[in-house]
Amino acid sequence: MKKIIWVGDSTVAFNQIASYPQTGIGQEFGRYIKRDWVVLDYAKNGESSKSFYDGGLFGPAEEVMEEGDLLLIEFGHNDEKPDERRRTEPRSSYQEYLMKYIRAAREKKAYPVLITPLSRRLFREDGTIENSHGDYPSAVIELGEREGVPVVDLTGRSRVLYEAAGDTASRKWFVYDHKNNRQDNTHLHYEGAVRMAGLVADGFRDLGGIYKDILA
């Protein structure tokens, strides 16, 4: 059975009951793919492309990766953080770390796919979404073009979705709870994870070829 292997941060990570109702995109991506594929989610909350690799968290994913598998690489939220353990710069160390995952996949004859970070749900007064990720999404797109790696622009796709839904309607996709004064515009509720996984599936459909062929 072929595998779809996720590496990334909390927005795509598999959540246990302790973090319910928070749900990651990788956790729900299996709904969109054919049943002869299996999803393995190694993403972890709080990690960047640097800390995930340097901390040895990629090792188990790399170990199970085989020829013909897909490696989905999504980082950025924590690469922006100021601490030395996680911080990368968009057009230098960030791209260098992403290349480590790409090379590992290619060495195994697997297919790497770069995914730009999920947009945060931060509305401006005019109803548009603030770019809270700076140059990280464009750095992913540029790296993909330069290295011939397919890219799903989840940053752009999610921003369009939020703006179309509007401020109030889009809250249901996030762990956003006025009653308990919790306003989390980064981490997804179950319904949001399903919806955002659908955006990744849409990206696969647009890529065509083997990426479209895995979809249910």
Image: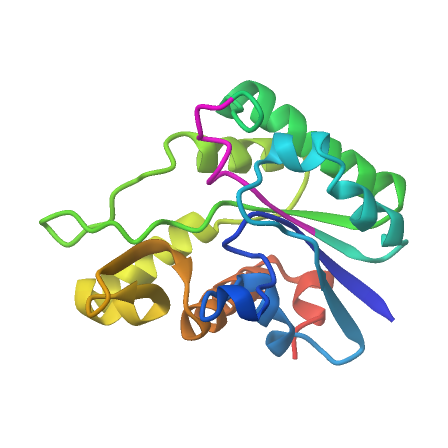
Residue 66: image location, x then y, percent: 89, 54
Residue 81 lies in the magenta-colored region = yes
Residue 33: image location, x then y, percent: 67, 74
Residue 121: image location, x then y, percent: 29, 54
Q: Main secondary structure of the magenta part?
A: loop
Residue 36 vs 55, above or below: the answer is below
Q: Residue at x 44, y 51 (%)?
A: 118
Q: Residue at x 38, y 49 (%)?
A: 119
Placement of the N terminus among the 4 image quadrants: bottom right
Decide if residue 135 is on the left or right side of residue 25.
left
Range of magenta residues: 72-83
In front here: 23 or 137? 23
Image coloring type = rainbow
In front here: 75 or 145? 75
Decide if residue 182 is on the left or right side of residue 26.
left
Q: Residue at x 65, y 67 (%)?
A: 212
Residue 69 lies in the magenta-colored region = no
Image-quadrant location for residue 184? bottom left
Placement of the C terminus among the 4 image quadrants: bottom right
Image-quadrant location for residue 95? top right
Decide if residue 209 is on the left or right side of residue 144.
right
